[in-house]
Image: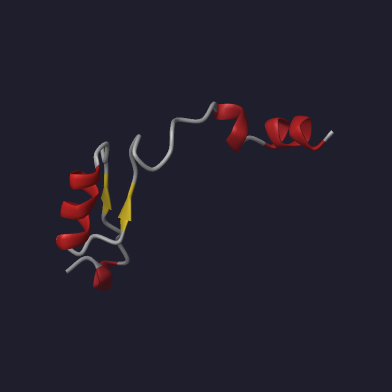
Amino acid sequence: MLEPLGAVLVAEGVERDHDLALVRDLGIAQAQGYLLARPSPASVFTSEGRRARSR
């Protein structure tokens, strides 16, 4: 239903293995949460932060 609109469904709050299993069973292709990755500081996403890490 979302594809014709160009929208992407993302499951949020995936913290346990059974959460991810449910997301997969529902056919949701993208997810985020502590199970998959911990939060990153904003500097990871800014050009200033990228410059600092490349030095």
Q: Residue furthest front?
A: 17
Q: Position of residue 29 (x, y in %)?
A: 30, 61
Task: Examine the image and state in which quarter residue 51 appears.
Answer: top right
Q: Residue at x 34, y 44 (%)?
A: 32
Q: Residue at x 55, y 28 (%)?
A: 42
Q: Position of residue 21 (x, y in %)?
A: 20, 54
Q: Is residue 20 left or right of residue 22?
A: right
Q: Is residue 55 left or right of residue 31?
A: right
Task: Examine the image and state in which quarter residue 14 appears.
Answer: top left
Tally the marks.
0
Q: Position of residue 45 (x, y in %)?
A: 59, 37
Q: Residue furthest right?
A: 55
Quadrant of image for the C terminus:
top right
Q: In this rendering, is residue 21 above or below 14?
A: below
Q: Is residue 10 left or right of residue 48?
A: left
Q: In this rendering, is residue 40 above or below 6?
A: above
Q: What colouring style does the render use?
A: secondary structure
Q: Residue at x 77, y 29 (%)?
A: 52
Q: Residue at x 26, y 67 (%)?
A: 5
Q: Nearer the viewer, residue 2 or 13?
A: 13
Q: Position of residue 33 (x, y in %)?
A: 33, 38
Quadrant of image for the N terminus:
bottom left
Q: Is residue 17 left or right of residue 54?
A: left
Task: Examine the image and state in which quarter residue 17 appears.
Answer: top left
